[in-house]
Amino acid sequence: MKVKAVISVVSVLIMVMGAAVSFAGIASWIMQDSLADTQGIFQCSAFSILGGLILHLKTRDRNHEVNPREVYAIVTVGWLSVCLIAAIPFVTLTNMSFTDSYFEVMSGLTTTGATVLTDIESLPKGLLFWRCFCNWLGGLGIVILSMAILPFLGSGAYQLFKAEATGPQSEQVTSRAIDTAKILWAIYVGLTILCIVIYRYLDMPIFEAVCHGLSTLSTGGYSPLSSSFVGMPSPILYVSTFFMMMAATNFTLHIKALKGDIFCYFRDEEFRWYLATFLFALTVIAFFLHTDAGYTWAQSFAHSTFQVASLETSCGFASDDFNLWSTPSKIILFLIMFMGGCGGSTTGGLKVARIVLLVKYTFIKIKQMILPHSLINLHFNGKRVNDEMIQKSLAFFFAFIFLYALTAFSLSFAPGIDITTALSGAIACLGNMGPGFAMLGPAETFAWLPDWNKWILCGAMFLGRLEIFTVIIVFVPNFWRR
Amino acid sequence: MKVKAVISVVSVLIMVMGAAVSFAGIASWIMQDSLADTQGIFQCSAFSILGGLILHLKTRDRNHEVNPREVYAIVTVGWLSVCLIAAIPFVTLTNMSFTDSYFEVMSGLTTTGATVLTDIESLPKGLLFWRCFCNWLGGLGIVILSMAILPFLGSGAYQLFKAEATGPQSEQVTSRAIDTAKILWAIYVGLTILCIVIYRYLDMPIFEAVCHGLSTLSTGGYSPLSSSFVGMPSPILYVSTFFMMMAATNFTLHIKALKGDIFCYFRDEEFRWYLATFLFALTVIAFFLHTDAGYTWAQSFAHSTFQVASLETSCGFASDDFNLWSTPSKIILFLIMFMGGCGGSTTGGLKVARIVLLVKYTFIKIKQMILPHSLINLHFNGKRVNDEMIQKSLAFFFAFIFLYALTAFSLSFAPGIDITTALSGAIACLGNMGPGFAMLGPAETFAWLPDWNKWILCGAMFLGRLEIFTVIIVFVPNFWRR
Ligand SMILES: [K+]
Ligand SMILES: [K+]
């Protein structure tokens, strides 16, 4: 392991993050926070850039050749370091503890959106922007990581979702990765701007429109309002639904659509299942909202559409306290939280493609029990899926459920917690969702949890966001040898 | 598919079950139920035997050759038919509906032990015995099925647990299966008698000792008392723990121990994990019972030991209303319900061996990400596990979790149900556990559920008991062709 090379790249990430903080300074200045706050943010930015620069100069070396192992180390160490930088503005400008600050930005950068802030509006506008910008940066980071970097390393967890025609072909890898990253960046930025413009057009105040736009496209779910989307008019809910759904769609499809193949979405097997579960869930929930909760049909559909989209895409916005909805609705939301949206997007959870793959695999195994000597291949999107991919998906599913159980178990030690809170809070963090049910429902916060629980949940968000294996391999002892 | 051959064997099972009902008649006579009740039970017995006989004579044929496909059909159709016979005494002697009667015996024969009886003591003693005897027959059935019949068909779900030195070797298969079945039967009967004798020695009334012995060794969990094991003295709790643990141990180990190798248990990897999780869980829960609930250490250990054993072995007896225990304790119990005990036993759930296998598999996949070209084999109990077995275990895990989600979802439609009840009730049935939490906790019954829910839970118990695939393949259309 070339530790020096790893630190060198991480130091660049720290500088970039430091530069990003200055955007929060600009937001703070425009929104007329107190001068001390604005200055404070810029100081954080300058300090971070300087720190990164010093580190970079100390580790600079011309002969850095980066192998897959180094990339994994960079991703893991880099993510944790970047969170450290992102937390500085919270530590210096508010009276939040280091734990709370780190939790808030880990939650932001992993696009989880779980918050420890009990009085959101009391914060300087610069920090409110910063939270949502963390969401956005995290979303961008994960799309580029999962679509343009990790698949080229032969990391099976990501190959399932990788951009087409990008087989690992020796020398070209780097240039291809950069090309893909550029296109992804353009789409992500374009969609974000479009979302912000439409929010503004629908009379959302400009600051809220910008912040919500950032956290919609990243499916992060932070809001500058403590009420989130409660009380928003239906058109805004539907617009938000549309962009959340776009953000949780495989970005490969957006690339294709951009090249003129607009109907490619409906030829994609994962997307069809994603849409089908979305429509099924929203219909059932709308029915219950109308009959049990006494909402009008229009209200029922607006809320169920928005809320199902919000949880299926792992965004986590709330237009209503869904914790008070009927039990079947809550179970649907709970199950959908495990599934998440499409691979190669900003969504969390297991991803639709994996679920479909595993269902097909199970049916094939059943068929093979009837006809033991038959060879049945698994096809996904019209192509044969190789065994290695299936096995990695199965292993991932198991690891996810196992980690979920561990997280729920550790969460259950929080004082006064109930089963529903522990079970839902665990998937809310591991699936990068944000809110859970009961004591961690959309009307509540994570502030009341003891510090050690917050650290465990930080770990869950981190593992969930980087699809578990990417992180775990870095912690296996013999990873660092050689 | 030789339908006639299937019906022929099923009709034998019906006759055997009819004969078994007469034991309930004898119990009824000894315990001095009203004459009408005793006669009624004997009439049910006679009717069933006669019905089976007629069916058998109509389908008798000398040239019945039974292939694996026929065996699967016999198991599935046979199980459902046998439940029908077992339900007759409840339908004729009580005012229970057909749904309730069928649920009660399905729960009995699958060794689930979930009850719809709200006033257990009001039933004739003959029927109370019959419930526990159903537990016992079901436990015997599943041990023989999973150890002596299905492994010989090459059914991977069972091969993991199969008795040693029983490779499928053409002609000998049938005689070997019969030999194995005989030994298993002897061990099962022997342990049951021993358990009953010790219960009686500890001053349990003879009728209760017999009934509890039957439902302890089958890990069925039915009790002739509505209070189950609440208020029982500690020695009885520890004795019961011992026998439940024995019942949930792979019977192959008992066979070995019987041949003189008494320490074989501790050389078995699955057993060691089973014991380790048992000790871990009971220690944590005892700690919480002592500190939070104010129990003495002796009480805490008695209750936690008994309750952990009861749920890990999927027996489902209750010595205390564990629904009122602290959240970490309940989460441990909830997770343990998924795991279950060892394969090749009467326990339900996923089985310890599968969990261990999947954990190992996941770690191997992680190692392979670091060293992509390395070949690492999975070893279990010192032997290499082949890929087919691993893949079937993974598929089983996925199918189990998927079915669990479906069951919980359908359960959530029951009027007035809450999330905890739906989530725990689903595993209580699919894992053949019995009680869940909240509205389906140990102090409650399944009586309040609507009929359609009871039928779905019958399906869950049935699928869980026969390890899913055994049942599902029979419902695949092209299974019946040819
Ligand atoms: K989120
Ligand atoms: K049971």
Image (spheres, coloured by chain):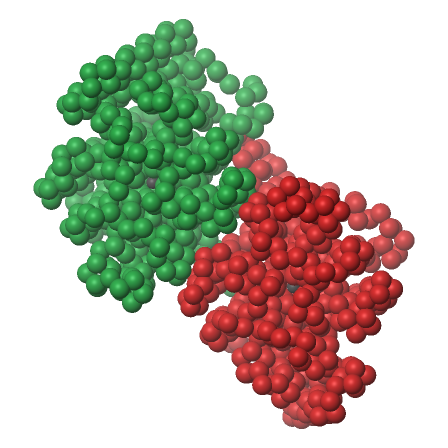
Chain colours: A green, B red
Residue A143 horizontal/vertical position (percent)? 32, 35
* Residue at the image point whose x is 58% and y is 85% from the top: B95
Quarter that holds the N terminus of chain B: bottom right
Residue A231 visible, this orientation = yes
Give the answer, above or below, for where A478 lies relative to B330.
above
Among the 4 quarters of the image, the one containing residue B76: bottom right
- Give the residue at x 45% y 59%: B418
Looking at the image, which residue sits at the far front? Answer: B294
Residue A479 vs residue B69, the one in the foreground: A479
The residue at 79%/74% (across/down) is B207
Judge left or right: residue B180 versus residue B413: right
| Number of callouts | 0
Question: Considering only vertical position in the picture, is B345 above or below A425?
Answer: below
Q: Based on the displayed image, in which of its 4 quarters is residue A446 positioned?
A: top left
Q: Quadrant of ligand 2?
A: bottom right
In this picture, residue B417 sits left or right of residue A298: right
The residue nearer to you, when weighing B127 against B404, is B127
- Residue A138 image point, x, y percent: 32, 31
Residue B471 visible to the viewer: no
Q: How far across and how far down the image is residue B339, in percent?
A: 61, 52
Front position in the image: A222 or B206: B206
Q: Is B126 situated above or below A373?
A: below
Horizontal and vertical percent for residue B375? 60, 36
Side (left or right) of B27 relative to B414: right
- Residue at image position (13%, 34%) is A206
